[in-house]
Amino acid sequence: MKIMKLGFFFGVALALLSGCANHKPFERTEFIALEATGYCKCQQCCGWKRNLLMQPVFAYGPQEGEKKKVGVTASGTKAKPGTIAADTSVFPFGTRMKIPGYGWGTVEDRGGAIKGGKIDLFFKTHKQALEWGRQTVTVEVKR
């Protein structure tokens, strides 16, 4: 019986300690008013087109004509709900944000028009992105 109690004690201690390993002691929270727009992986939102070989390529900008991986973020992850595009000199990749009406997301992408206090929120469909539109929201930022 004592061995069983001892095993239980170590199991509880291990669970408590492993939870502490995920805690970021120097993480700070800020509340910032930002302009938030919506985007999806479509041609219109992400500035790509198909070339003569029907391959997706950048439609404009410094990479114009180069192959584009549709649905892949600048950080290399697959875009999904919760993906945020931001100016990474202001909000580096991995910055977590809670956006009213959208929920929690992580900065994993950047865009040509996303500078300073602007963010772009990923949606599954173009219709959802348009419905979000352009809003000024007070965002909870975890750094």
Image (spheres, rainbow, N blue to C red):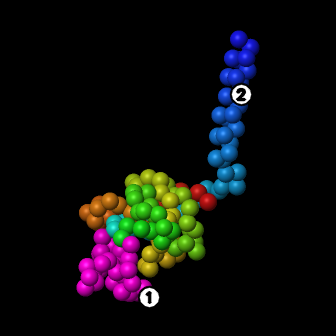
What's the magenta region? 42-69
Q: Main secondary structure of the magenta part?
A: loop
The answer to if 64 sits in the magenta stretch is: yes
Amino acid type indicated by mark 2: Phe
Determine whether the residue tagged by mark 2 lies in a helix, strand or loop. Answer: helix
Extreme residue toward the top, this view:
1
Amino acid type indicated by mark 1: Pro
**Residue at 45 percent of width and 68 percent of height:** 73
Extreme residue toward the front, this view:
53
Q: Which mark is residue 10?
A: 2
Q: Which residue is under mark 1?
A: 62
Badge 1: residue crowd in 10 Å (few <14, some 14–19, many ≥20): few
The answer to if 130 sits in the magenta stretch is: no
Badge 2: residue crowd in 10 Å (few <14, some 14–19, many ≥20): few
Between 53 and 104, the residue placed more toward the observer is 53
**Residue at 43 percent of width and 79 percent of height:** 113
Query: Measured along the vertical axis of the image, is residue 60 above or below residue 105?
Result: below
Query: Measured along the vertical axis of the image, is residue 9 above or below residue 139?
Result: above
Coordinates of residue 32 in the picture (x, y in percent): 54, 63
Coordinates of residue 50 in the picture (x, y in percent): 28, 80
Q: Quadrant of residue 80?
A: bottom left
Cα–Cα span, label 1 and label 2: 57 Å
Rendered-image quadrant of the N terminus? top right
Q: Quadrant of residue 82?
A: bottom left
Determine whether the residue tagged by mark 1 lies in a helix, strand or loop. Answer: loop
**Residue at 66 percent of width and 40 percent of height:** 18
**Residue at 38 percent of width and 77 percent of height:** 68
Locate residue 56 relative to residue 103 in the image: left or right. Answer: left
